[in-house]
Structure formats: structure tokens, C-alpha cells
Amino acid sequence: MRQAVTHSVAQRVDGAAPPGEASGAVPRASGRGIQPRRRVSPTARRQRRAACLFLAPACIMFAVYVIWPILSTLRLSLYNWDGMSEASFIGLANYIELFQSPTFYTALKNNVIWLVLFLLAPPMGLAIALYLNQAVGGIRIVKSLFFAPFVLSGVVVGLIYSWFYDPTFGLLAIIVGHGIPVLGDARYATPGIIFAALWPQTAYCMILYLTGLTTLNSEQIEAARMEGAKGWTMLWHVILPQLRPVTFMAVVVTVIGALRSFDLISVMTGGGPFESSTVLAYYMYDQAIKYYRLGYSAAIAVVLFAIMLLYIVYHLRRLLRSEH
């Protein structure tokens, strides 16, 4: 108390007013004292340091192999470069030329067709998974046979279906009774390639759903059975809500596969006939490798990346909203 009075008197002698009196305000007594700042324990510091050290390699690799290529592609799309001579800055000229190219809209239309038809893979994979999710003798062998297409590379699948569609000696010609030039007709080339791509993609979705079916809550299923739920009602109201994260993963992977489809097109048609089966990924490759237009190819890559990003963000927001 004496120290407080002495300090106040000293302030008045020096001509300085106590805080609050200079502005005419009356100081208020605070009901809460100032809480001391909590000190972080050495153990917590070591744990944070260890977490940062473990995350550092993954963050560095993500920055080097993902972030840096994206930024480099964005920068390259603003230049005219053939890969050998000095690059020249041309601004948005590559994008203007791209949006005026008829081949771009053909590729974009084919990507939409891929997207619509390729989304048949998750429901077909779910149907096969529901069929295989039973305790029957020899079911493991059947599961292995259904999963086998996913192990094959895209080149092998493309060669198999090229022989299947061959109008001279292909299996399709034997079944129908006459040759059908599926890959040589602009009307059938894209659907024929998508049908070949659905074979391994359905197997992948089947594995995802088989894994999800093993994590179902048996208590909810038993309670639904006691309430009289069965068949379609059980599937729609009990099974599918629990498989929502698996469905999200299957849809996202399928959409990405549809938008970056390249290997089957390269093996089966090469973008033909007359660029009727080309997609954005193959169009990008075609411009970069055949015509040495790396800046124009980078502009195609940026547009393709933007389409993927918008679609994935849209589905991610829908999933988060449904969970909350």
C-alpha cells in the first residue's frame, strides 16, 4: 500500500497523471487477474520437434514433385517454346489459340463422354462386391479372377481389346457373325475404348467396396433386420450410408482416371480416326511430343488440371456437408 501511494505521489510531482486521469476516465477494477502464460513442457516440445522432422521429408517431396511442377506448368503455358530454342513470352496466346481450336472441343466432348460412361464403374463394382461378400466355398478364387484385370497394365488391356474388336478374326466378329470396325469408325471408337477401360476400373472399385463391406457396423444391420428391413431398403438406408467414404473415394479415383485417360487411346486408336477419339491428355501429349509445342501443351495441362480440381473440390464439399 505504501509503495502504491509513493508511486502515485511521485507521478504527480513529475507532472504525469496516473493512467485514466489524463483522459478523464475512471480506472476500473478488473474482476479477473492476468493469467500467467502456460509454459510448454520439454516433453511437448520434443514431441512437436519429432512430428515436424517426420513430416519434413513428405512435405519436401510434395513440394518438389507436386507444387513445383504445377507452378512450372503454369509459367510454361505463357511461353512459346519448342524444347530446344530460347522460350519467348507470349502471354495468354496459347489459351486463346486453344479455345479457338476445334480439336480442343472434340477432346473436351470425349472427356465428358468418358466421365459419364466411366462412372458406371462404381455401381458395377458395388454390385460385384455385394455378390462376392459371402462365405461360400471357392469364393477366394472367384475374387481373384474378378480382381485380375486391375493387375494388368493399360497397354495389355488395350492390346487384348484391340484383338477382341478386330473385324477379321476378333471374338466380337465371331459372336456377331460379321466384322464391325469398332476402332475404325468415328461413331464407335470412343465407346469401344471406354468399354475396355471399364474392365480394370470396375475391378478396382470392387476391391474398394469389398474392403468397405468388412467394416460395416453389424449392430446396425441386425437392428435393421429386426425392424423388417431387407433387400433394397437395407441397401439404401443401412449399407450405403456406411459406405459413403468408400463411394467418395471410388468416384474421385474414377473421375481422375476418366480425365487423364491416355494409355488405352494411345494403344488402340492413337486418337483417330481423324482425331475423333482424342481426349485432353492425349491431345496434350500429341502437341508436345509430335509437334514440339511445349507451351501450348502446358496450356492444355492447366485446363485439364482446373477441370479435375473443380470436380474434386465439388465432391469433397458435398461429402463434408453430408457428414456434418
Image (tube, rainbow, N blue to C red):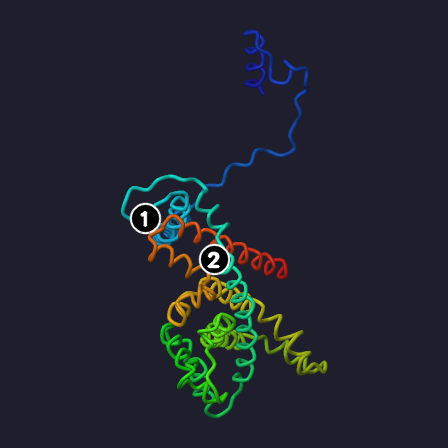
Residue 82: image tag:
1
Residue 277 is situated, as x and y percent measured from the top left of the image, at 46, 66
Q: Is residue 281 above or below residue 78?
A: below
Residue that label 2 marks: 103
Instruction: Please give left or right for residue 234 compared with residue 298 in the image.
Output: right
Amino acid at the residue labelled 2 = Thr
Q: Is residue 47 visible?
A: no
Viewport quadrant of the C terminus: bottom right
- How packed mark 1 is, by other alpha carbons closer than 10 Å (few <14, some 14-19, many 20 or more), is some
Q: Quadrant of residue 117?
A: bottom right
Q: Is residue 55 above or below residue 251?
A: above
Determine whether, in the image, residue 241 is placed left or right of residue 250. Answer: right
- Considering the numbered disc 2 on the image, is that residue within a helix, a strand or a loop? helix
Q: Position of residue 193 (x, y in %)?
A: 46, 72
Along the line of sight, which residue is nearer the eye, 19 or 61?
Answer: 61
Q: Nearer the viewer, residue 3 or 228?
A: 228
Please state if 174 lies on the left or on the right of 156 as rendered: right
State the image coordinates of residue 114 (x, y, percent, origin top left): 51, 67
Q: Quadrant of the N terminus?
A: top right
Q: Quadrant of residue 120?
A: bottom right
Judged by depth in the image, the label closer to the viewer, 2 or 1, is 2
Q: Position of residue 81 (x, y in %)?
A: 34, 46
- Residue that appears at 70% across and 82% down: 226
Given the image, on which type of amino acid does mark 1 rest? Asp
Determine crowd level at label 2: few under 14, some 14-19, many 20+ residues with C-alpha closer than 10 A: some
**In the depicted view, which residue is nearer to us: 38 or 65?**
65
The residues bearing labels 2 and 1 have C-alpha atoms spaced at a distance of: 20 Å
In the rendered structure, which disc, 2 or 1, sits on the residue that comes first in sequence? Answer: 1
Query: In the orientation shown, which residue stands out farthest toward the left?
Result: 84
Q: Residue at x 46, y 82 (%)?
A: 146
